[in-house]
Amino acid sequence: MGIAADDDDAALRALRVRIDAVDRELLALLNRRAALALEVGALKQRSGAAVFRPQREAQVIAGLKAANGGPLANDSVAPIWREIMSACRSLESPTRVAFLGPAGTFSELAALGYFGSSLTPVPCVSIDEVFRATTAGAADFGVVPIENSTEGTVNNTLDMFLTSPLKIIGEVELRIHQNLMGRMTMLGDIRRVCGHPQSLAQCRGWLQEHMPGVERITVSSNAEGARRARDEDGTAAIAGAAAAEVYGLNLLVLEVEDRPDNTTRFLVIGRKAVRPGEADKTTLLVSAAKTDAPGALYRLLEPLAQHGISLTRIESRPSRKKKWDYVFFIDLEGHAEREPLATALAELKRRASLYRVVGAYPKAIL
């Protein structure tokens, strides 16, 4: 027994020495990559090219996942290389990213997941403010929620695109775990629960079953709910685990969302459109002259069917021009500048009274 244990200890020490050597090799390679990134940055600065190119980063990650032979899981490749590219990009220029704040929100997690942790955070008090900060140049990009798999569309985000000049340049899908948190240690001490309306709705069934008599209070963000839970006696919050750490709260019950596949899709917005990549999606804002006329939507969408274009999502919103008049937000497979979508869109545009490409961008990397 003693000899075997000594042999195991010796083998473990030898493996750790080899791991340390590999870590030093990785560090040297990362610094070589960073030096190359600085050269790229100098060329971009001379030519006026954008520092951040989402289609290029998506292409790099897709290529690495395809080349991965394991045992590293493919799901680990994207977050690792996001961080590597984020650190290298920060050497070229800081990336300012606006999101619904304060710290500890799911929007912040989505921003970190897309841009990596080497970003300059610009927390905003509302989705409207994210759009304003990005439009004005106070932030280079913004991250806003667009839909949840349980509760559907975030209408405020859609409505902002009716008047905003910003473009969608990317998307993020974030698995959402909602948690009950507070200063207390016993559920019986909770008199009210705060949360963003979307989060409270995603936990409606659990709250009704386990806390039927407890008041529910909607707040502007889950982080704001966590702040109130920190400052108010008897107040608990529904939020992500990061908020509990930021505001010093106890995690009372984990994963109280009603559906195990609860996921939110976020859009990344910027001032400039992005060029085609290898796996893209296009979002349109369109309308017909008379949206209440028979077959109006059919006539708009007919060119898509004729050219074999997959429509992945459609939402209608009031146009705000007159009552019962609507605009349609449509997500399509493909990039607006590439065939066969380009031809289909040219035909659709001729039939539309309103037509705008809100964005053509890389699909979320899963």
Image (cartoon, rainbow, N blue to C red):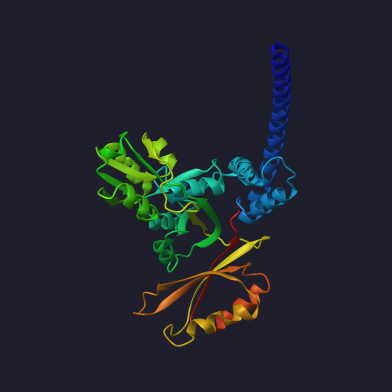
- Measuring from the top left, give residue 247's x and y in whole percent: 37, 36
- Measuring from the top left, give residue 365's x and y in whole percent: 61, 53
Q: Quadrant of residue 310?
A: bottom right
| Residue extending farthest front | 1
Residue in the image at 53% along x and 81% along y: 300
Instruction: Please determine whether, in this image, residue 252 is positioned above or below residue 356.
Output: above
- Measuring from the top left, give residue 337's x and y in whole percent: 64, 70
Instruction: Please determine whether, in this image, residue 293 is positioned above or below residue 89.
Output: below
Any part of residue 352 in sight: no
> Is residue 65 left or right of 349 when viewed as pictured?
right
| Residue extending farthest bottom | 294
- Image quarter of the N terminus: top right
> Is residue 366 left or right of 164 when viewed as pictured?
right
> Is residue 348 left or right of 323 when viewed as pictured?
right
| Residue extending farthest top | 2
Instruction: Please determine whether, in this image, residue 137 is positioned above or below residue 255.
Output: below
- Residue situated in front as seen by the camera: 207 or 99: 207
Any part of residue 32 in sight: yes
> Is residue 226 left or right of 147 when viewed as pictured?
left
